[in-house]
Amino acid sequence: MTTLLHIDASARSGRSDHDRFSSHTRRLTARFIDCWAAARPTDRIIYRDVGQNPPQPVTGRWIHAAFTKPEQREPWMQEVLTESDTLVDELIEADLIVAGVPMYNFGPPAQFKAYIDNIVRVGRTSGFDRSRPGDPYWPLLAEYKKRLVVLSSRGDFGYDEGERIHHLNYVEASVQTAFRYLGIADFTSVAAEYDEFADDRLQASLARAEASIDTLVERLLSIQTISDAA
């Protein structure tokens, strides 16, 4: 059985295929999950809506607790880290992470940044040792061979590599950097554009994104079937 972690980060609560003023990324993640579940109905799906229920941002108390050795933590430290521990547990359990991350002002939403800040944890998802020769940092999740799929939406157009405003796109690069730091290097992304234009170009972009998702799911299902048979 494969475990999927489905994350939505949009501040919009609905899906644009149900309500045109709602979220495109929720629409895209739902399509991915529905396609996967249709092919593998017994796989486990963990759902986390950080857009509507954002994690608490990192505080000074959180930092104090996270950087205290577990055996030395006081009760209040365990309490401060409870939410973070839950998010880390979900991430560790997942084989495939499917995250809907819209572009807000050229980067991910603050809600998703809070999520990342909660899952980058010394001793749980990453290692740190000042006495270690060379690089004192190392990933702790690399051995699990997890995959990350980011499904995004953008108001303007031309953000992909080689296009006119690629240099303004800090969504995929920042998300990929954070997860790669943890050891999750298998990364794929699909995005819809033209949201602010709200015309036929938006609809065509959404259709292309959905077709790309269908192809991506088919490819990943094939890989998973081979892995299951090995």
Image (cartoon, rainbow, N blue to C red):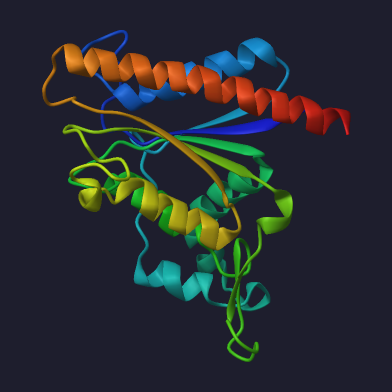
Residue beneath the point at 72% across and 50% down: 144
Can see residue 30? no
In the rendered structure, the answer to whether residue 120 lies left or right of residue 128 reads: left
Q: Quadrant of the N terminus?
A: top right
Give percent across and percent down for residue 11. 26, 33
Note whether 137 is above or below 175 in the view shown.
Answer: below
Give percent across and percent down for residue 179. 51, 54
Residue beneath the point at 52% across and 76% down: 67
Give percent across and percent down for residue 137. 57, 76
* View extreme (front): residue: 162
Q: Nearer the viewer, residue 196 or 163?
A: 163
Give percent across and percent down for residue 80. 47, 61
Can see residue 28? yes
Residue beneath the point at 67% across and 57% down: 142
Q: How many marks?
A: 0
Q: Nearer the viewer, residue 154 or 58?
A: 154
* View extreme (top): residue: 18
Q: Nearer the viewer, residue 108 or 164?
A: 164
* View extreme (left): residue: 197
Q: Nearer the viewer, residue 143 or 91?
A: 143
Residue beneath the point at 54% across and 14% down: 34
Q: Quadrant of the C terminus?
A: top right
In the rendered structure, the answer to whether residue 153 lies left or right of residue 138 reads: left
